Amino acid sequence: MIGWRLGLAALAALGLAACATPAAVERAELRPALPERAEVAGVPFEPQDELWCGPAALAMALSWSGPKLTQAELAPEVFTSGRAGSLQPDLLAAARRHGRLAVPVAELGDLLAELAARITELGREPQASVIVLASEGTGAFCAGASFAELSAIADAESGTRFFMGFANLINAMRECPKLIVARVHGKVVGGGVGMVAASDYALATTAAQIKLSELALGIGPFVVGAVIERRIGVGNCAALGIEAATWRTAEWAHRRGLYAELHEDGAALDTHLAALVRRLAASNPEAMVAMKRVFWEGTEHWRELLASRARLSGTLVVSEFARQAIERVSGSLRGG
């Protein structure tokens, strides 16, 4: 295995696999008509054999996303005859064995936690040379948090927990000994900009505009701001944070160092990405670990720093000003 491709899908479902990608990320700000629920078309139907609802469901999900397996092939992995059924942990483990990650998702925090845990796990994986952070589709790379989740935050304590999801992910990326490469094919908002900045190398297309919209919602990019500032400098980070309604072009981000490479389209992006991964896979692992350590020198205090930033954001998000701003922006995007 020369590298692991780690799929990102905020607010939907997280796909994570070696050289595989998940569903695209979108939200109201980028596609106002995005429904709360959607039907996934094209999933092959496989009538289940008696008691094999678990193997059959998993076979259909895997066949839709890539691996073509039957329930008969999967039953030995997930069916427990003594219980006349399949246990959820067995189904989750089987999905991972076949290159997919099934995640029980209740909210964005679940996705961020799973992403951070998987990066930590891959950092310890001897067969992984490099980790690729990618998002499937032609829409956004990452659209950040949803207005519904921000509106649902009840108090400063739950607000802090919410923003700690971003803090923990940035720290996991920073502390991971493997180099992390971001494949950025589309627009990036808020926390997504922080994820790109926390990678060690980012390739993007000319469609990969960026925006930090937090101030428009009555808060600020405090957690992700630390890593964005480190990547592009205080002045550029301030410009992004202050002009919260302004999209910056991919060329702007490239000139300031957020993106290391800029390509015309997804095909060119993937060609250069594959070549980069091959070169890194052939490089000295010890040297890459040492490089990663040097890249992030001076951030040893970030667990405390980002926790304090999360508390600040958590307090602001439940202020009356922020609540009104979130409702106002959300309503305007809904056409209300």
Image (cartoon, helix red, strand yellow):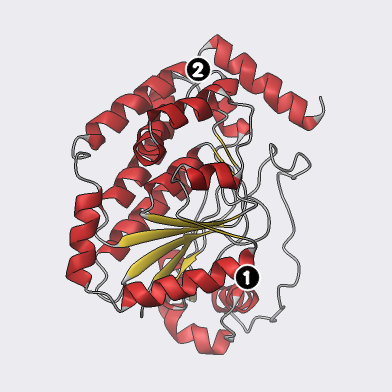
Residue 118 spot, x, y in % from top left: 36, 59
Q: Mark 2 points at which residue?
A: 318
Q: Which of marks 1 and 2 is in front?
A: 1
Give the image quarter of residue 181. Answer: bottom left
Q: Mark 2 is on which residue type?
A: Val
Q: Which residue lies furthest to the bottom in this view?
A: 72
Location of the N terminus (image quadrant) = bottom left
Element assignment for label 2:
loop
Looking at the image, residue 119 lies above or below residue 94: above
Residue at 58% in and 47% down: 250
Relative placement, left or right, of 335 versus 259 is: right
Q: How far apart are marks 1 and 2 (CA)?
A: 43 Å
| Residue 69 visible | yes
* Mark 2 neighbour class, 10 Å CA radius: few under 14, some 14 to 19, many 20 or more: many
Residue 141 spot, x, y in % from top left: 58, 52
Closer-to-camera residue (206/302): 206
Q: Residue 267 carries which label?
A: 1
Earlier-in-chain disc, 1 versus 2? 1
Closer-to-camera residue (42/124): 124
Give the image quarter of residue 228. Answer: top left
Looking at the image, residue 317 lies above or below residue 64: above
Looking at the image, residue 112 lies above or below residue 146: below
Residue at 45% in and 46% down: 258
